[in-house]
Amino acid sequence: MSSEEKSAWIMGVVAVCAYAAYLVLVLGRADGVPLTEVRYVSTMLWSIGAAIVASIVLHVAVAIASPKDAGKKDQRDREIYRFGEYTGQSFVVIGGVAALGMSLAELDHFWIANVVYLMFVLSAVVGSTAKIFAYRRGFWPW
């Protein structure tokens, strides 16, 4: 498995785990309280920060575990990376448009922030999934 495929696995798994932990904590606080009144900001920031730190630590650990593969990319790796990033970035755009629409409709900040966070997570997961499928099933650029 190339270091780029390992990186895709790390990004996908970390994104899912961090978001799942965030959801568990926020929904756990909602016990009979409307979601818009739940304290979520610090939990969201800690979740994002923890995901960044976990991703860095795991990337360093993978580089240490297999130093001969670390940082090596060929043309196929670059094309798969670009394909995965383009695929995942579409969710960032969707999230931005959704957040704009929600703010124009004057929805609560809770919903706007959570839609943006969800779209960032989906961007990471879908992009990572696209990369993993390209590595596992083959990649044919058009």
Image: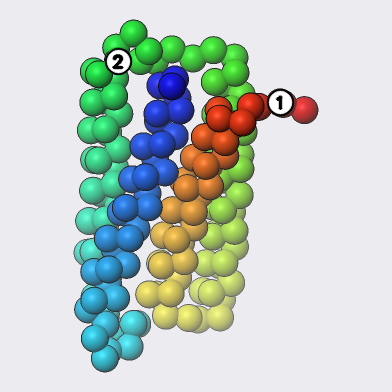
**Residue 140: percent from the left, percent from the top?**
71, 26
Q: Is residue 76 visible?
A: yes
Q: Residue at x 49, y 14 (%)?
A: 73
Between disc 1 and disc 2, whose residue precedes? Answer: 2
- The quadrant in which the N terminus is found is top left
**Residue 98: percent from the left, percent from the top?**
57, 67
Q: Amino acid at mark 1?
A: Trp
Q: Which residue is mark 2?
A: 66
Disc 1, SS: loop
Q: Nearer the viewer, residue 116 or 100?
A: 116
Q: Is residue 82 visible?
A: no
- The quadrant in which the C terminus is found is top right
Furthest residue to the bottom? 32
Disc 2, SS: loop
Q: Residue at x 25, y 18 (%)?
A: 65
Q: Which residue is mark 1?
A: 140
**Residue 133: percent from the left, percent from the top?**
57, 36
Q: Amino acid at mark 2?
A: Ser
Left or right, 138 with respect to 42, comes to: right
Q: How far apart, in angstroms, are the residues tagged by discs 1 and 2? A: 28 Å
Furthest residue to the right? 142
Left or right, 140 with respect to 89, comes to: right
Query: Does 59 appear above or below 108?
Result: above
Q: Residue at x 27, y 89 (%)?
A: 33
Q: Residue at x 45, y 70 (%)?
A: 112
**Residue 111: percent from the left, percent from the top?**
43, 74
